[in-house]
Amino acid sequence: MADLVVEELSMRFGGITALDSLSMTVEAGQICGLIGPNGAGKTTLFNCVGRVYQPSAGSVRLGDVDLLALPAHRIAYAGVARTFQNLGLFPSLTFLENVMAGAYSSVGGGFLKSILRIGIAAQERELEARAHRLLEMLELDRHAFSLAKDQPFGTLKRLEIARALASGPRLLLLDEPAGGLTDSEVGELSELIDSLPERFGVTVLLVEHRMAMVMGISDKIVAMSYGRKLAEGSPEEIRQHPEVIASYLGGA
Ligand code: ATP
C-alpha cells in the first residue's frame, strides 16, 4: 500500500520551475532513492514534503494525512522526520541530549498531557531511556556523554539519523547521508539505512549522489531531471533506462 503519495507537485521560485507536476508514490517500508543531476529538484521535493516550502500546486499525503494542509511546525507530529546534509545537531550538547532534543520535537501537545499525567521528572526519564535505547541500536552508546563537536563527521552522520528517529517517524527523509564520508563509512551507513524499515518501521526517502549506495539499498528509484520525473522503477530498471543513462548515469 502506498504510504507517501505525491501528486502533480509543482514549485516555482520566481521564473524558475524547480518542480514540474511531479507525481510519485512510496510503499510503506520501502526505501526510495531520488536521483538526478544538480538542479533536478531533489532538494526542493524534500523541502516540499518536509514542509519547509509550500508548493505552488499539487498534493502530498502520508497515509490519510494531507501534509500540505498542516502548519509546518506540525510536520513532526504527523510522522515526518529528516536529516540534513550539513547536520541538524547541537554541537555543544552530548549525543544523548541531541537525541532527546529530537524526541521533544515530536511530542508537542502530547508532551504537556504526559507531564500532567506522570510529572516532568518521569517524562524526562522516559525520554532519556528512549534516547539511550536508540543510541544502543545505532551502536553509538559509547558516545552517549560525548559532546557532538568532539566526534568525527562519520559518527555524527549516524547521530543525525538517531536524532531523526527519536521522534518515532513514519517517514524518514535522508538528505545526502553519505556526503563527505569515506568509502568504508559509506559501507557501514548503507547497512544501517538498509536496516531502518525493518527495525524502526519507517518508510525512507533518500537523496544521494553516491550511485552504488543508492542502487544497492533502494527498493525503488525515482530519477528526476529539470523538476520532472524522468523514470521510476527498480534499481535494475533504472540502470538500463536509456534516458536516465543519457542524462545522468553514464557508466554508473
Ligand atoms: P543538487 O543535487 O545540486 O542538490 P537538486 O536536484 O537538489 O540539486 P534543487 O536544489 O531542488 O535541485 O534545485 C532545483 C532548481 O530550483 C534549481 O534550478 C535551483 O537553482 C532552484 N532553486 C532551489 N531552491 C531555490 C530557492 N530557494 N530560490 C530560488 N531558486 C531555487
Image: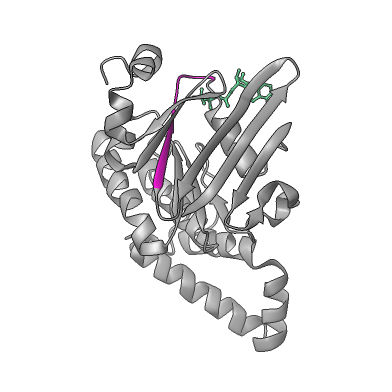
Is 1 located above or below residue 220 in the figure?
below
Is 69 located above or below residue 216 in the figure?
below
Would residue 90 be visible to someone looking at this image? no
- What is the residue that sits farthest to the front in this orientation? 1
Q: In which quarter of the image is residue 77?
A: bottom right
Residue displayed at 51% across by 43% down: 87
Magenta residue check for 36: yes
Residue displayed at 62% across by 28% down: 21
Q: What stretch is highlighted in magenta?
A: 31-39
Q: In which quarter of the image is the C terminus?
A: top left
Residue displayed at 56% across by 59% down: 102
Q: x and y percent of residue 40 in the render?
A: 52, 21
Q: In which quarter of the image is residue 237?
A: top left
Residue displayed at 30% across by 44% down: 190
| Frontmost residue, 154 versus 217 | 217
Q: x and y percent of residue 230 in the render?
A: 46, 23
Q: x and y percent of residue 247 in the render?
A: 40, 13
- The number of callouts visible is 0
Is 138 located above or below residue 43 in the figure?
below
State ligand 1's quadrant: top right
Left or right, 217 with reference to 180:
left
Left or right, 54 with reference to 156:
right
Would residue 83 be visible to someone looking at this image? yes
Q: In which quarter of the image is residue 115?
A: bottom right
Magenta residue check for 164: no
- What is the residue that sits farthest to the top in this orientation? 246
